Image: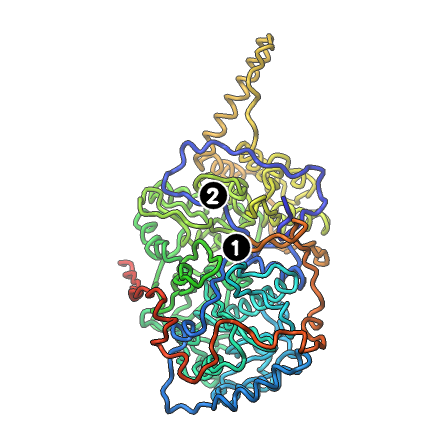
Amino acid sequence: MKEFNYPRPELSQHPPSTPSRSSNTSIPSGLLSTPMSFKQSGSGPFTSIDDKRNSRMAHMSNEVVDKIVGPMPVKIFLKKFLPKVSKDKPQMSLKSYQKKMEIVSKSQSEKDMYTPFVEAIKPLCPDFYIRDTHDLPFTAFHSIIIKPDICFYDVQKPTGDETRDIKRVEMMLEFKHREKYDPFCDAADKPLLISSTDARDTLGQITSYASAHQAAQFRSHVFSLLVLPHYARILRWDRSGVIVTERIPLSSCLLRNFFHRYCYITPEERGIDTTVTTLPPDSKIMAEEKIFKNQLLLNGSLYIVSHQLYMDDNRSPFGRSTRAFIAHSVSENTKVFVKDTWRLSSQTPEHELYKTLKENKVQYTATVLNAGDILAQQTRTQDFISRKWAKNPPRRLRKHFHYRLVLKEIGNPLTTFSSTKLLVTVVHQALIAHKEAYEKADILHRDISANNILIYKGQALLIDWDLSKNEKDPKQAREAERTGTWQFTAACLLSSKTVGPHTRTDDIESFIYVLTWVAFKYASHSMSKPLLTGFLRNVFDYAIADEDGSPDNGGQKARYLKEPDELRQANFASKNLLHLLLEITETISTRYRKPPAPENPLRQSWSNNKQDDSEAKALDEKMNALLSSDWIIDLFGRALELSGWPENDFAKEHELVRDLEPRMVTKSSQQPASKDGDEELVEMEEEGDRGHDDVDVDEMDDGVDDGVDDGDDDEDDDDDDEDENEETEPDEPPVKRLRLEKPSQ
């Protein structure tokens, strides 16, 4: 097995071991799923790994390899995503455009390409300010620095110093001066992705730009370009995946037409969410409350957003990208909690689940005020994976709808507890909510994490039910990849050999990881910074690639459950918290303990046989007890009755070691192994050294045989033969607006 993403620090003498699988005889039949994928979208907010540039680029390239659809013929790309503009719009002559692009192709270095390229496309985009930004770093999410080479800005938006503000960017372009940096291959007899270190670095780089772009703005999709001396590729990113075009010669009128159309299509077609607008600086509410900046619409109701509480998928351009805000409801004249997410089309809308929970009187759940899909905002990448031009396409990409949910209650994160007794109280109440949802409403949560348990007026709120499933609903489909948060997912579900559904006991195990993770990160203890960092990485972040490339926790969580040495070493100030953690860890570890060996026929000792039978019986009893949540709710209740809980031992985050950069080995299910049979070690160069070397243009291909005719201005007509042979894209029904009636008073 090869290391995948994060190495295991040399913390413990216990080697990784594959956990034994418990019997799933009582598992509901409708909740089948495959082993979880390890992605930034499902692990980023809770990872303890320092995000250095080389590891970040490798992470990002891993993030995208199974989400790419291409190479899409550029004529089809233009027809599907950038409709023609009226002929009265000013257009640059092809001859003039080609003359300017010749200068780009003859450039002796990457830096020499920027200015002539900008000059060539400026006349095509009069409504945009186009700037060379290669030496203008942008601070993106988590203080990560990105440096796209050229950026588009809407001329209606302020520029000046605000060109450093990624919220102002319309489109990003990345340049490379050598063909070896292109991560894509158009040749029919070769894989779509190129496996070289240089190509993978570029792939990670452009993916990080798309991630930052979508995280900083309210968007349904973004466009980006990869530009080389003789050709370019256009990419369209949404929350399902990314479409990349075939090579487009720089001199082609198709590339010229792309920029011309991009200038005149609507903001919605460029991917801007027009249901969100920026408040004018002179507005009354901005004058009264300086924190308010944006306003958004949902089902005709206006909400003024104050500040963002969290965003959980922001290291990835894909997935749900859930954001949470405190907002002011104009109609209700009160503050509310707003959740903005890209829900899976196959999942029951979350407000319907809340309605079911309320009807069944499930405690510690929130009150829905408003909810619905944002009309016409849905992913499209998944619609093209079966097209004949798609090479090595993903087996399945999941469709997402843009969705908003407004809740009455505004909770605080679990990591803001005022005492460890309150921490345990809130997790205890969340367990009760989970039990009642399962037993009263047949709903299994399936995404228990530190973000999904809130503190509200000294009590729990168990939120984020959008990944839950009804165990008795026969229509619940099997998902292509298990969803959830890597750090808090049950150990058995992190095994690449897992077969079987997500169970109630898996969720209970997740509650234990939540309490453990929060306790080690925020409760008072004496564990040293290096040991704490190693423990969190070793148990919660660790992932390796199995023989088939599937991510696996390597048995690290199961090892910890069976031998929780770190719990005893930490010396928690709250002894009651320690006793509770030890007890629940010992109990749940039963899932991963092997039963006694079969009776040895040569053994004659009746007493030994009786002891073995007793141990096996005790193990069976514990396993049966784990099928319910009564045991853990009872333990929490008894712990809270103990005396001696510290007062005011409030949450305080422990610092971690941030200068340990893990060795990276990348994987790709679409790429062949290197000649020696091993994956290539990704050793990144410094940011500024990529692609700026002088190069003899004669060493490069003079012409790019990419199957695209440079023809005349009419080569992208909708009745082109190439498009006639393309399968007809099915008409998509309009997204049904979801409504939830206000609860009766």
For badge 2, the amino acid type reads Asp
Which quadrant of the figure contains the N terminus? top right
Nearest to the observer: residue 372 or residue 727: 727
Between the C-alphas of marks 1 and 2, the distance is 16 Å
Nearest to the observer: residue 534 or residue 214: 214
In the rendered image, is residue 339 in sight?
no
Q: Is residue 35 left or right of residue 666?
A: left
Check the image and report above or below for 38 versus 491. Answer: below
On residue 696, the disc is none
For badge 1, the amino acid type reads Gly
User: Residue at point 52% right, 79% down?
Assistant: 168
Image position, residue 470 (x, y; %): 35, 46
Image position, residue 471 (x, y; %): 35, 42
**Image color mode:** rainbow
- Residue under label 1, please give it: 42
Check the image and report above or below for 346 versus 578. Answer: below
Image position, residue 723 (x, y; %): 37, 71
- Residue under label 2, please give it: 507
Which quadrant of the figure contains the C terminus? bottom left
Q: In this view, does 606 lie to the left or right of 527?
A: left
Image position, residue 175 (x, y; %): 61, 75
Q: Earlier in the sequence, mark 1 or mark 2?
A: 1
Q: Is residue 318 left or right of residue 175?
A: left
Nearest to the observer: residue 238 or residue 255: 255
In the rendered image, is residue 722 in sight?
yes
Task: Report the mark closest to the observer, 1 or 2.
Answer: 1
Judging from the image, what secondary structure is the residue with disc 1 in?
helix
User: Residue at point 56% right, 17% down?
Assistant: 612
User: Residue at point 40% right, 36% down?
Assistant: 27
- Circle 2 residues within 10 Å: few <14, some 14–19, many ≥20: many
Judging from the image, what secondary structure is the residue with disc 2 in?
helix
